[in-house]
Amino acid sequence: MPRGRPSSDPVKLLRLALAAIDTQIAELQEKRAQLAAVVAGSRAPGRPARRVGRPPGRPPGRPAARLIKVKAAQKAIKRRKVSAATRRRLSEAAKQRWARERIARG
């Protein structure tokens, strides 16, 4: 667009704006063609594009075998039980630790 004093003719201004838009459209179409060529060149000819999403062969409701093995292993581990007296001692020790921390902070 030419610089200087703006024209008062609205038709001339619209023509200039349309010319600028057409130039931008042409530049964008060139860039799109370049990107399309890059994408087309990145894939070997004759090979389909990589699938996106859930792999085929496994219905949505069935968990993977690996997950079943992990859950079975978790069930096999015995949890240690802590008596009420031990839980009480641990609780008191934690309260004392936090009390010392609060005093130290001021």
Image: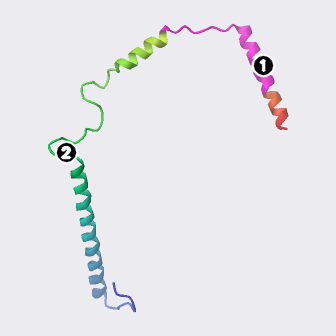
Relative side of 59 to 76, left or right: left
**Relative to 48, is 23 on the left or the right?**
right
Q: Are marks 2 and 1 in contact (CB under 8 Å)?
A: no
Q: Secondary structure at mark 2?
A: loop
Crowding at dot 2, Cα within 10 Å, few <14 / some 14-19 / many 20+, comes out as few
Task: Say if the magenta span includes residue 74.
Answer: no
Q: Is residue 38 above or below residue 98?
A: below
Q: Name the residue type under label 1.
A: Ala
* Residue 93's disc number: 1
Find residue 12 and report its image quarter.
Answer: bottom left
Q: Position of residue 49 (x, y in %)?
A: 22, 42
Front-most of residues 95 and 12 = 95
Q: Which label lies toward us, 2 or 1? A: 2
Residue 26 lies left or right of residue 82; in this view the side is: left
Q: Residue at x 39, y 91 (%)?
A: 4
State the quadrant of the C terminus. Answer: top right
Q: Residue at x 69, y 7 (%)?
A: 83
Residue in view at x 78 percent, y 19 percent: 93
Residue placed furthest toward the left: 46
Q: Which residues are magenta?
A: 76-97
Taking 46 as reference, is 6 above or below it?
A: below
Q: Which mark is residue 44?
A: 2
Q: Is residue 96 magenta?
A: yes
Q: Amino acid at mark 2?
A: Ala
Mark 1, other Cα within 10 Å: few <14 / some 14–19 / many ≥20? few
Real-space Cα distance between discs 2 and 1?
Answer: 66 Å
In this view, the residue in front, 8 or 62, is 62
Q: Earlier in the sequence, mark 2 or mark 1?
A: 2
Badge 1 element: helix
The residue shown at (29%, 72%) is 24
Asked which colour scheme the image uses, the reply is: rainbow
* 67 or 95: nearer the viewer: 67
